[in-house]
Amino acid sequence: QSILTQTPSASGTPGQRVTISCSGSSSNIESHYVYWYRQLPGTAPELLMYKNDQRPSGVPDRFSGSKSGTSASLAISGLRSEDEADYYCATWDDSLSGRVFGGGTKVTVL
Amino acid sequence: EVQLVESGGDLVQPGGSLRLSCAASGFSIRDHYMDWVRQAPGKGLEWVGRTRNRANTYSTEYAASVKGRFNVSRDDSRNSLYLQMNSLQFEDTAVYYCAREWQPYFYGMDVWGLGTTVTVSS
């Protein structure tokens, strides 16, 4: 059971916008930057978003992040078949004195 | 090419020990915080621990689930990261990834290895 709560699944048709949420608390999301990682099937995770809403070099602007209080979200606009993957939020938790990941959201493109 | 390559994964009995290695190439780990993250079969990502850089006294931090059993270390001269795992339990079965924290990305983990598999079974 992760300390960061993500909806287990999300789906959309090509071209649609999908939003993934990540819920935490004052000891993690509210106090620290949120990161998002994408894991394509059978591959290692990759950094998709850092400092809540910043995209690393090479990540298309179809991906956007936001944070408000104890929650964060990742939006994917113009959904494509290659966006099918597991998406994880992550941050630091003061109570645990360590990094924490959300349970992951599996995005399916219908 | 910037790359991390893990090795050392194996089948081990409960209570046993194992040491994983992570070799970096294309960059020097000297200035970076380095992490271990694992993923049990069919499960999500779980942070295991990390070592900070020399400027931060190589301090280490661990997840509660491994604290006291696992040890993260590094050898900057060999450009390598290590994970010593002791008192292994069934629930330690996972793919173990090493990852680099990139300061310009506010310590987001921007380079990951392909992982090495640890199976704890009798």
Image (tube, coloured by chain):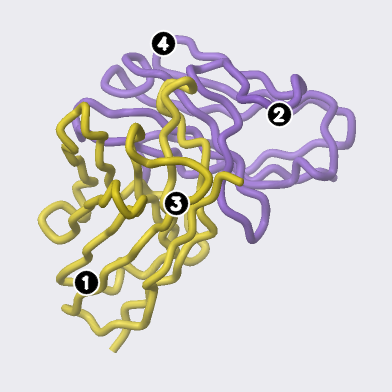
Chain colours: A purple, B yellow
In front here: A62 or B70? B70
Which three-letter amino acid code belongs to the residue tagged 4?
Gly
Label disc, if present, on residue A58 of the rendered structure:
2
Pick the front one: B65 or A17: B65
Nearer the observer: mark 2 or 3; the answer is: 3
Labels 2 and 1 touching (C-beta < 8 A): no
The residue that disc 3 covers is: B24
Return the residue at label 4. A69
Q: Are marks 4 and 3 in contact (CB under 8 Å)?
A: no
Q: How many marks?
A: 4
Which tag, 1 or 3, sits closer to the chain's start? 3
Q: In 3D space, how far apart are the residues under numbered discs 1 and 3 (Cα atoms)?
A: 26 Å
Chain of the residue under the numbered disc 4 shown in the image = A
- For marks 2 and 4, the one nearer the N-term is 2
Are the numbered discs 1 and 3 placed on the same chain, yes or no? yes
Residue beneath disc 1: B88
- Amino acid at the residue labelled 2: Gly
Find numbered disc 2 in the image and state the secondary structure of the residue it sits on. Answer: loop
Q: Is residue B25 depicted above or below B58 in this figure?
A: below
Question: Which of pointers 1 and 4 indicates the residue nearer the eye?
Answer: 1
Q: Chain of mark 1?
A: B
Residue drawn at 71 percent across, 28 percent down: A58
**In the picture provided, is B120 more to the left or to the right than B71?**
right
Choose between B122 and A18: the one closer to the eye: B122
* Residue type, mark 3 in image: Ala
Q: Residue at x 77, y 23 (%)?
A: A62
